[in-house]
Image (cartoon, rainbow, N blue to C red):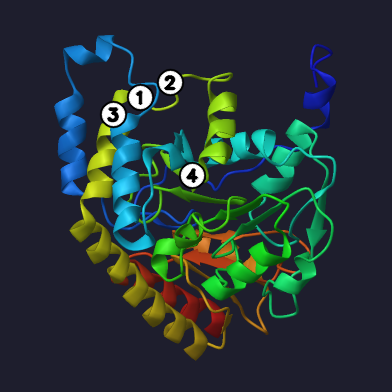
Amino acid sequence: MSRFWSTTVRALQPYVPGEQPKLANLVKLNTNENPYGPSPKALAALQDELGDSLRLYPDPESVRLRAAIADHFSAGCGDITLQQVFVGNGSDEVLAHVFLALLKQDRPILFPDITYSFYPVYCKLYGVDFRCVPLDESFALRVTDYAQPNGGIIIANPNAPTGRALPLAEIEALLAANPDSVVVVDEAYIDFGGESAVPLVNQHPNLLVVQTLSKSRSLAGLRVGFAIGHPELIDGLQRVKNSFNSYPLDRFAQAGATAAIEDRDWFDRTRQAVIRTRAALTRDLEALGFEVLPSAANFVFARHPRHDAEKSALALRQRGIIVRHFRQPRIEQFLRITVGTDEQCAVLIAALKEILGA
């Protein structure tokens, strides 16, 4: 700890991202990356961007990308305009701006006790008062628990790390119970089985939906996220963004992300492959005696009644397989396992059979 640190930095407990080990022949199932590559059209767009134009700044408003996102969601969600779309350097940056622009209020904001662990980090960074609302015994979110005074609500849907998802009707009930608060729905994993809340944004001016291209479009390395909501909410985010970094997305990110959004065939083909493998992985884990929570994400959350999760994670690591274990109350006996390819999941199941048998 340096004597030159600010009081804010001294009090921070930073978010710890998933491990990115540099090991050969690794079966990496710990950070929910997509096992399939990006759209070939996205890769071609990245290649096309390589040239003399890199001496110029990128479009600070990312107009072409925002228009592609608006067009994509207008096809199934009603009319979404350019003014309803905000983009940033990954959904983490988008969320950071959300906490400062929309959730820093007089009353504490609400979010689940078991959820994306960046939320309390943002709160402490920006001085946002918050209250954790416990999930029920089966790790489901009860909308009725959020019918209380608050300065805003943020939920991950599907939730992380549990994978459980709320149906759209429950999101509508949450909005109806909180008409005077901003409700943020973080949909990082929505494309693997949940119902997006984007169709509700034109009916609820207090709703903001956040998504990412890291998961279902295989662009975790490109860092692109976005939010969709009422133009006044988007304007608040733009004010923070332009007071922080006018150029959050470089030319490669804008070109690749635009092409990925426009390539709907690749998007549908790869996400359906993940969904099929998730179902098979769930069956195989249950056959080994694991309890697996219902998942609408590209991972499963599982525990074994007779085997310690931390020891199992270590045993898998010794066999070149990495999964995520959280040393957190209520979930310390769970493993979060990313859905890989069929071949990767087969290697995982074979290793677990060996570990459990031993």
On the image, numbered disc 4 is attached to which residue? Answer: 227
Mark 1 lies on a secondary structure that is loop
Cα separation, mark 3 vs mark 4, equals: 20 Å
Identify whether 150 is placed above or below 283.
Answer: above
Name the kind of residue labelled 4 in the image: Ala
Name the kind of residue labelled 3 in the image: Phe
Q: Residues within 10 Å of mark 2 (few under 14, many from 20)?
A: some
Mark 3 lies on a secondary structure that is helix
Do the residues under discs 1 and 2 have CB atoms within 8 angstroms? yes
Pinpoint residue 181: horizontal percent, then vertical percent: 72, 51
Identify whether 133 is placed above or below 41.
Answer: below
Dot 4 or dot 2, earlier in sequence: 4
Cα separation, mark 3 vs mark 1, equals: 6 Å
Res 85 visible: no
Classify the position of the C terminus by image quarter. Answer: bottom right
Which of the pair 233/20 is nearer the observer? 233
Cα separation, mark 4 vs mark 2, equals: 17 Å
Dot 3 or dot 4, earlier in sequence: 4
Do the residues under discs 4 and 2 have CB atoms within 8 angstroms? no
On the image, numbered disc 2 is attached to which residue? Answer: 247
Q: Residue at x 79, y 63 (%)?
A: 133
